[in-house]
Structure formats: C-alpha cells, structure tokens
Amino acid sequence: MVPFHPWGRTSILDDRIIADLGPQCKRQFSITPYSARLRSRIEPPGAFGSPTRLLVSTPEGYIPDLNLRSLLIIVLTALPLGAQEPPPVTVLFLGDSITAGYGLANPDRAFPGLLQARSDSLGYHATLVNAGLSGETSSGGLRRIDWLLRRPIDILVLELGANDGLRGVSLDLTKQNLLDIVKKSKAAYPHLRVIIAGMQVPPNLGETYAARFRQMFPDIARETETDLIPFLLEHVGGHPDLNLADGKHPNVEGHRIIAETVWPILERHLRDLSDPSP
C-alpha cells in the first residue's frame, strides 16, 4: 500500500489537491475516498503529462472521483500519521566564494556538499542548500535574503563579510548588514537556528581594522543569541598546500578540513531537529 503524502505545501482547488513540490514541479492528485477502511495507491502519471491520481480501493476495486469532504475524512481518519514522512531539515548556506567552492572542478566538493554527504551517510533527513556566490558581500547577501527565505529553512549558516574586509568596507556597515540578515531570517522563521561563520582579514588595512573585524563576528553572535564558528578557515588559512594558487581559496583538501570544523555544531542542530521528543 502506498500512503498519501502531501509533499511540500498543499492547496485545495475544487475536488483536487495540488501538492507543490517546488518552483519547477507540481503534482496533482485526484482523490477517490470511499470509507475509512479503504486502501490507497498512487497511479503514475499518464502520457503527455496527465495528472498523477491517488486511487482509493474497496474490496470491489478502485473507485474514482468522489467529493472533497470524503477526501478530508480519509486523510484525517484513515491514514496513519506515522505513514507521512516528515519534511527534511533544510540548511541554507549563505556565503561567498568559499561557500560556493570557487576554483573547484566539482562544486559538490565544497564544504556544504561534503556536509551533505556526511549527513546522508549518518541517516539524517536533511537538505543542505548552497547559496554561495563568488564575490558576494554582506550588502549583496542582504539584498538576496528575502528571495532565499521564500523557501522555508530550519538552519542558516551565514558566511559573509570577508569580501567587505578585503575591500576596506566600513565595519559598521558590514555588521549592520549581517545583523539585518539574521533578523530578517528569524522574523520569517522564529524557530530558525543560526550559525555565524567567523572570518579574519590580513593586517594590510591596519592592526586596528583587522582586530575589529575579527571581533565583529563574536559580537554579532552574542547580540543575536546565535552560534559562532570562531574562524571558518581554522587550520586552512595561510597554508599553501590547502589552498589554490591564489592563496585565498581552499582546495579540495582545505574544504575537507572546513567541513570538519563546521560539522560538530551543525550535527548538534541536525540531531536536535531530528529528535521527535520535546
């Protein structure tokens, strides 16, 4: 028996349920309930895109097209709640070229992709979304965040600010942008978990600027009551063998080490969100 799963958001139109699977795909179910003891199966789509049909059976066979009220009775009373798979924990990585995997032949070898592989191998039901963009600044991230938040998220890993620092952007502006990203995200999803990825800049802009830049990330984490990775590039930054020829972007081995740095704090949240107990 194949139970009915309302993937994604669902909406009701006439006697149909439309299950929104994302921006590029919708699945439409014509439901045929009969009684609370019926069994159901999903009939695959027919030729030329005809809709998938969820058919409900009686001992006499599969019966088509009864009304919406009967559908709701079936969904609410006939199908066990345990049969419905919970949605995955969604993790959004909002970052710059480091998150994007700049210079790697396969972007999946960047640390978010490595973390997805580890999450999968350990059985976590999680989707890790890489929204890294090379050259991204805190201002660019703030401009993008509303669009990114159209998809519900459970965890935000915020890795921005390094390009601001390399360009000598006002630290007050960078800090406010990052604070606004966190505030917008939490306003959209009040139970959101946020992880701030701390960064550092070389002292060529002055020791005072570099020190203030380094301290900015702990300050943001404290003010927003979020988690902090003190330095995302710990054990990677400044090591030529772990970076590309430009000396700024991690190579495959460097990303593996970054993934090791991020994993303990990310796994704690995945474990908490995957645990059905209060």
Image: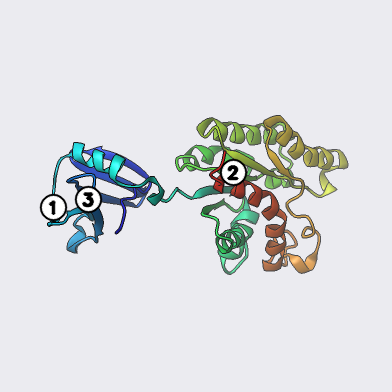
Q: Residue at x 15, y 40 (%)?
A: 67
Rendered image quadrant of residue 66 = top left
Q: Is residue 120 above or below residue 215?
A: below
Residue 147, percent across and down? 47, 40
- In percent of the image, x 21 and y 43: which residue is there? 16
**Kind of residue sitting beneath label 3:** Leu
Q: CA distance from mark 1 to mark 2?
A: 46 Å
Work out whether residue 163 can be spotted.
yes
Q: Earlier in the sequence, mark 1 or mark 3?
A: 3
Question: Residue 156 has which mark?
Answer: 2
Q: Nearer the viewer, residue 15 or 175?
A: 15
* Residue under pointer 1: 63
Q: Position of residue 36 (x, y in %)?
A: 23, 44
Q: Which residue is tagged 3?
A: 38
Q: Secondary structure at mark 2?
A: strand
Above or below, 112 against 141 in this view is below
**For residue 235, which quarter of the picture?**
bottom right
| In the displayed structure image, the side of residue 13 where residue 219 appears, left or right | right
Judged from the image, the secondary structure of the residue bearing numbered disc 1 is strand
The mark tally for this picture is 3
User: Which residue is pictured at 48% across the width and 50% down the height?
Assistant: 88
Q: Residue at x 81, y 50 (%)?
A: 202
